[in-house]
Amino acid sequence: LLWTTDTHLRITSWLGTSPIGFNIPANQLIGTSLCEIFETDNPYFLPIAKHLKVLRGNGPVAYELNWAQRIFQCHLEALRDANCNIIGTAGIAIDITARKHAEQALQESEALFRASFEQATMGMAHVGMDGKWLHVNQKLCEIVGYTQEEMLRRGFQDLTHPDDLSVNLEQFESLKAGKIASYSLEKRYCHKDGSIVWVYLTVSLVCEVSGKRQYLICIIEDITDNKRSQQALCESEQRYALAVQGANDGLWDWNVDTNEVYYSERWKSLLGYRDNEIGTSPDEYLKRIHPLDIERVRADIDAHFAGLTPYFECEHRMLHKDGGYRWMLNRGLAIRNAEGNASRMAGSQTDVTERKAATDRLAEQAFYDTLTGLPNRALLNDRLLQMIERAKRYKKFVFGVLFLDLDRFKVINDSLGHLFGDQLLISISQRLKSCLRPEDTLARLGGDEFIILLDDIKGIRDALHATHRIHQCLKAPVHLNGCEIHTSASIGIALSTVGYDKPQDILRDADMAMYRAKALGRARHALFSHDMRVHSEGLWALESELRRAIERQEFLIHYQPIIALTSGRILGAEALVRWEHPQRGLILPEDFIALAEETGLITALSEWLLRSVCAQTKSWNDNGHPLLRVAINCSPRQFQDRHLPDLLKVVLDETSMDADNLDLEITETLAMKDLDYTLDILNELSALGIKISMDDFGTGYSSLGYLNRFPIDTVKIDKSFIKDLTSPETGAIPGAIIAMAHSLKLKVIAEGVETEQQMLMLREQHCDAMQGYLFSKPMPAEEFTALLCNYHYPARALFSNPTGGH
């Protein structure tokens, strides 16, 4: 896994799949905080602490992380800008679970798998050629009931049941005579307490290289409890096979005194050889090491022999029988004699060719976007920095930056799916490359944002020519999976003639120009100017004023009535916030809500709005309007707060308001963002008695299956559909929504009703209620109170029934 984060520990790039134990898919990791991934706010939690250490300049750091029953070898370094300021972290994690397990097994060995011998779950013993026990492990002692000292004074014949002794001795003699290499049999031992112990015995002969027989290796498995179970027997044989064959690594055992090496069959097969094709000389290993690696390997072996390293470990290339080289990881541990000199070293060899190739690919891909293969932000910054330095040295050298953002990409992505969106991005990137010069650079920042570096241009004219080529290039539709997609881009242009010292500065200005182009409409472009920076600084000033406005409560709440379409009765109202700015006057929500959401100020604003609306609604309910229900829009940040139900319960208790009179509106897109979370939070709100409305219905991508599962009372048809109610292309949409909602036993409110014709058509389609300028604009609480007191149903002839009654 390879990732980068910013200084707030938000992931800015990610290579690899989503690791086991993470509750977020890999394709949604960008922008997600590590604290959210690990679900912790503890700064001493190991991964978080290590990232913070690097961000403080105390890097690089390496550590091992145990997570989700896996072990990762992690390395973190600081990401720095051109001035060496830390702007984030870069990390790589490699799954070393298998390696760690192999290391542990090797390190626990004393001599020829001492740990396996002593700690095996089966009895193990070395038996001399005379049948005497030479070494026995504790498990064997437990099986037969004797101590190790008692066992070593006996032979295997002394413990074998008399009825099994002849067969055992026959196999034993055949093994000694060299007629067989090993044998296995079931036999009985006589336990020290007189009981019978059934065992499965495997015996192998160990010989010196010269052929002289040394001793027998015996593996004894207690099968007393499961002898009659064939399944248990099969499992025992599998465990034995695994114990004999070991891991998938090749094993080697170097007798330094005799300068002979035992290479396991697996060790040889890793290099493409059969068992009889490799001898016992150390040169069988050393001569196959790549010439560029041999000195490093010898140095690592010498260092371990000299006691300078706790173990031998070296990753290097080895010649395969097919003539190619494979990357191998060799590990070993020396056994020392009484003088402290290495007399033996045993170890393992692992083929890490694929892992090495993957690591190299990751290192290479650190500078390229995994989806499109284009340069990513890191490589882009490097090339930008080179151009900036070149522009400083050569005054006539000019370069340009085009910041591209695809128009309506989010709609396409949400409607047709992320896989379709990815295919579209690949197609667009290929099309963009085709209309650029070889010396220009096309990079992808992420999402649907692309950067083009125009190298060595004459000025604004060349930049505009390139921009027009791009617009023309994107005009043709993209055909994907049978769909014809029309797309375009908003392009911001920044030139080096402004004078820049840092890549992020020119990217910032190009980004600012792109947003100006997007504000002008689709398929537009804009050149950065000083006025744009002034405007951007104005947004910063507006944010500061917004913070003060929340502290000083410079907000008003207006209420727009919701009217029953059949009777004309006022059912309730939607609460809409306004900012009463001391100098600018009344500011509508579209001019500050997005900023409040982005800066996090929406939380305090939403809580104030909630308390004020509940208190006002309670007043109306107590003064003759008990059935009046008031709706409040729930912001995305507020909805994602897991404590939202707790806050609502507190506010309802404080204001003594009936929860049935509160309607919480969430957008369709927000509801579908995290289905499991949405279901949980909506069920909690519904349990409190709060009503839930789906706002802007029809503009998102909701699934009817999930809509049926949500505890929703009402859907609100977006005003864009009401505006086009008489259109032959889209006029049928409101009727379809109404029919669908009623089939799910949901109420329907139409927003933005401005004409009598719209209202009459909605009545014919059996819509339940409406709101809009046809009846009333949003008004302050005092005017809404007067309306409630003076309103008589129906207020207009528009609400007459078909028979002429009212």
Image (tube, helix red, strand yellow):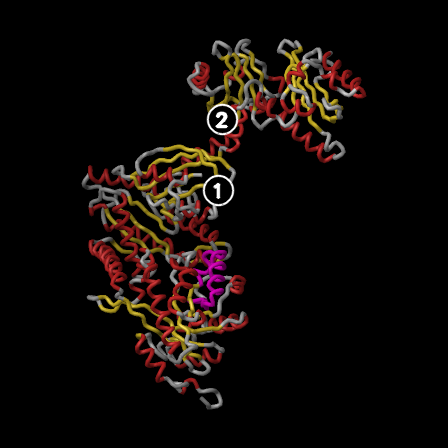
Which range is magenta? 668-697
Q: Tag 1 or tag 2, which sits nearer the N-term?
A: 1
For residue 34, above or below residue 806: above
- What residue is pinned by disc 2? 327
Mark 2 element type: strand
**Vertical arrangement, residue 725 with respect to residue 349, above or below:** below
Q: Position of residue 501 (x, y in %)?
A: 22, 42
Mark 2 or mark 1: which is in front? Answer: 1
Q: Position of residue 300 (x, y in %)?
A: 44, 18
Q: Outermost residue, front direction?
A: 193
Q: Nearer the viewer, residue 293 or 340?
A: 340
* Magenta segment includes 690: yes
Q: Amino acid at mark 2?
A: Trp
Residue positioned most to the bottom: 804
Total labels drawn? 2
Which of the image's four quarters has the N terminus?
A: top left
Q: Quadrant of residue 536?
A: bottom left
The residue beneath circle 1 is: 19
Residue at (48% x, 39% y) in the render: 67
Q: Is residue 715 above or below residue 429?
A: below
Q: Position of residue 371 (x, y in %)?
A: 43, 45
Q: Quadrant of residue 391?
A: top left
The image shows residue 684 at horizontal and vertical percentages of 48, 61
In contact (CB < 8 Å): disc 2 and disc 1: no
Q: Say what amino acid the circle numbered 1 marks.
A: Pro
How far apart, in angstroms, are the residues tagged by discs 2 and 1?
26 Å
Q: Check disc 1 and report its element: helix, strand or loop.
A: loop
Q: Is residue 432 left or right of residue 238?
A: left
Task: Rate crowding at label 1 as few (under 14), some (14 to 19) or many (20 or more) other CA atoms within 10 Å.
Answer: some
Q: Residues within 10 Å of mark 2 (few under 14, many from 20)?
A: many
